[in-house]
Image (cartoon, rainbow, N blue to C red):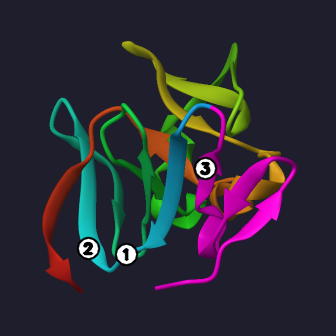
């Protein structure tokens, strides 16, 4: 159990557990020791044993990986940006055959500051338990 504090109409716990009290929308970020791997057409794009797992109301769990665990040399910055009212503005990266495959929040909202600069892929495979 953890303590919650109220920030600008939202409740917040450790690692930015955020709940919009008017809509019931919740985001929880947890440190994990799960081994995750991202493979695209047989090529490993990322492998990490220190992902952050983001749980958001209405969405599947998403693994946010430290940039050191991602083959950023294979990715090209995209001109795409999206805005999430709960996380902020996302920037995207692409592969030649996979546009906007990866995203990150370079300047996330304070309630989810833990995901700053971590990269997230649409498809992430959990390959084992603690490393």
Which percent across, then down, holds residue 66? 55, 63
Up-down: is 54 above or below 21? Answer: below
Helix, strand or loop under label 2: strand
Q: Relative to the observer, which residue lies in front, 20 or 94?
A: 20
x, y percent for residue 27 = 53, 50
Residue 121 lies in the magenta-colored region: no
Residue 18 is inside the magenta segment: yes
Q: Residue furthest front?
A: 22
User: At x 63% / y 57%, what residue is drawn?
Assistant: 115
Quarter occupied by residue 68: bottom right
Given the current orientation, which residue lies at the most extreme right position?
8
Please provide percent x and percent y for residue 6.
79, 62
> Which residue corresponds to the image point at 66% horizontal and 34% vertical from the top-left?
22
Around disc 2, counting alpha carbons within 10 Å, would you say few (fewer than 14), some (14 to 19), or many (20 or more)? some
Are the residues tagged 1 and 3 within 8 Å (C-beta)? no
Residue topped by disc 2: 34
Residue marked by disc 3: 19
Q: Which residue is mark 1?
A: 32
Q: Are marks 3 and 2 in contact (CB under 8 Å)?
A: no
Q: Are marks 2 and 1 in contact (CB under 8 Å)?
A: yes
Closer to the camera: disc 1 or disc 3?
Answer: 3
Q: Tell me how far mark 2 sits from mark 1, CA to CA.
A: 6 Å
Q: Nearer the viewer, mark 3 or mark 2?
A: 3
Mark drawn on residue 73: none
Instruction: Give neighbour class at mark 3: few <14, some 14-19, many 20+ (Cα, 10 Å).
Output: many
- Number of numbered discs: 3
Q: Does 50 sit left or right of 77 as displayed?
A: left
Residue at the location (37% across, 31% down)?
58
Highlighted magenta segment, given as a residue range: 1-22
Q: CA distance from mark 1 to mark 3?
A: 21 Å
């Amino acid at each position: 159990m953890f303590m919650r504090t109220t920030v600008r109409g939202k409740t917040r716990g450790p690692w930015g557990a955020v709940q919009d009290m008017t809509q019931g929308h919740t985001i929880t970020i947890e440190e994990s020791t799960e081994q995750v791997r991202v493979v695209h057409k047989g090529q490993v794009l990322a492998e990490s044993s220190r992902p952050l797992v983001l749980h958001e109301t209405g969405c599947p769990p998403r693994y946010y990986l430290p940039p050191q665990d991602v083959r950023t040399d294979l990715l090209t910055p995209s001109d795409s940006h999206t805005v999430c009212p709960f996380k902020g503005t996302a920037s995207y990266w692409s592969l030649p055959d996979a546009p906007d495959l990866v995203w990150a929040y370079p300047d996330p909202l304070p309630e989810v500051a833990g995901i700053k600069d971590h990269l997230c892929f649409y498809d992430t495979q959990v390959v084992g338990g603690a490393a």
